[in-house]
Image (cartoon, helix red, strand yellow):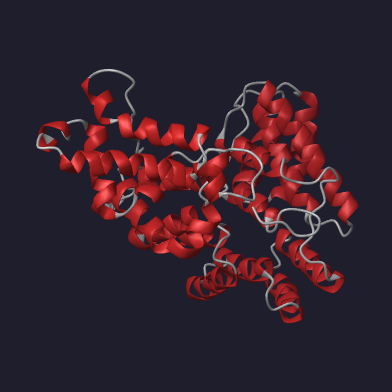
Amino acid sequence: MRRTADGPSCLLLILVSLCAAPGLVAQPAAVAPDQAKRQEAANLFQQGKRLEALPLLEELAKAEPQNAALLVALAACLVEHAATLPDKEGGGKERLRARELLDRAWELGDRSTLAMNLSQLLKQLPESGAVRFSADPKVDEAMRAGETAFSRRDFAEALKHYSRALELEPGNYSAALFIGNTYDRQNEVARAAEWYERAIQLDPNIETAYRYYADMLAKQRDWGKSRAMLIQAAVAEPYNRIVWRELRAWAALNTTHINEVSIGVPVEGDAATIWRPYREVRLRWQKGDAFKKRFAEEPEYRHSLPEEAEALTAVAENLEKLESVEKLTADRSLDLLLQLHKAGLIEAYVLFSLGDAGIARDYEGFRAANRSRLEEYLERFVAPAASVQRAR
């Protein structure tokens, strides 16, 4: 995720957005000493009135410190409350407390999507818990004022401050994104779309605007375009787990699934002979001079995109020469490898399906020159258009 001077860009709105998503709400358990108070807190939380729910959840969580669902709901409210505080230090303390509550909920066994998403994002904050929207203090001040108004659901005031921030800093991704999200929350679809697209133009390699846009389109039941936006989100940030959770959620709404594309490399049997070129190429990169020739500036060997792609391509090219190719491609892995080879998408497969820490370092460079190939791979093999159905 991109970073500003003090923390992840757009993190604050991402956190608040996750809290607001209806499918992510973790409701308190049904049994409580004060059922009426619990029900009131649950209703406020479901309605997105986090600030109103906060004091009730504080009281309930204090009475039941072992109730993981209450701790998660309280953490979500603290994140939104942090946005209303005028000083970065105060907001940082609230987010750090939310992080501690989520850690405790995890120890108690809570594995809800809301808890995992919030925890993942909060852990990306600096030790102070502070979030900074711009190095320009005037822009940062305007963004914070907008967030305070947004948390109060004073959307007109929020738009005024976000627009001011964008006027001062026209390239501020967060400002454009937040304007879009504010229109989205008011169901002004056309204007929200316009601003989401503007944020994408400012930085196409951040997933957030694509994902928010996709969520809005899904609410309009535009499933095809929603899928397209999520595919672009995955291309923007392929190693962000939130993107893939959203793709799977889209698939569930469309009674389909996201394909787990995998090629198995056998270690014994007849197929292992076909895979010999794969092992030979890998050995040359690991023990020979192939890596040093390609990455002369790197002091140590690492697993890389060109190594894995060359090894898989060697198998595919060898396979094409064999007379028994039809029989061999009854093997699912070999058939898939040939399909990817013929489509010129082996590199995309490697980056998405085999993207360990070494290979991931090659992603940005490949994406800069091959964005359309990455999208094509996801469209054809991971979330094919033929799978798009109307949700019932």
- Nearest the eye: 2 or 59: 2
- Nearest the eye: 109 or 349: 349
Question: Would you say residue 112 is visible in this rendering?
Answer: yes
Residue 283 on image: x %, y %? 45, 31
Which residue is found at the position 63% from the left and 47% from the top? 19
Q: Is residue 222 above or below residue 54?
A: below
Q: Is residue 50 left or right of residue 248?
A: right
Residue 24 on image: x %, y %? 55, 42
**What number of labels is visible?**
0
Spot the residue most to the front: 289
Q: Is residue 267 left or right of residue 169?
A: left
Q: Is residue 73 above or below residue 154?
A: above
- Nearest the eye: 390 or 259: 259
Residue 360 on image: x %, y %? 54, 45
Spot the residue most to the top: 268
Residue 349 on image: x %, y %? 38, 45
Question: Would you say residue 257 is visible in this rendering?
Answer: no
Which residue is found at the position 59% from the left and 67% from the top? 203
Which residue is found at the position 52% from the left and 75% from the top? 194
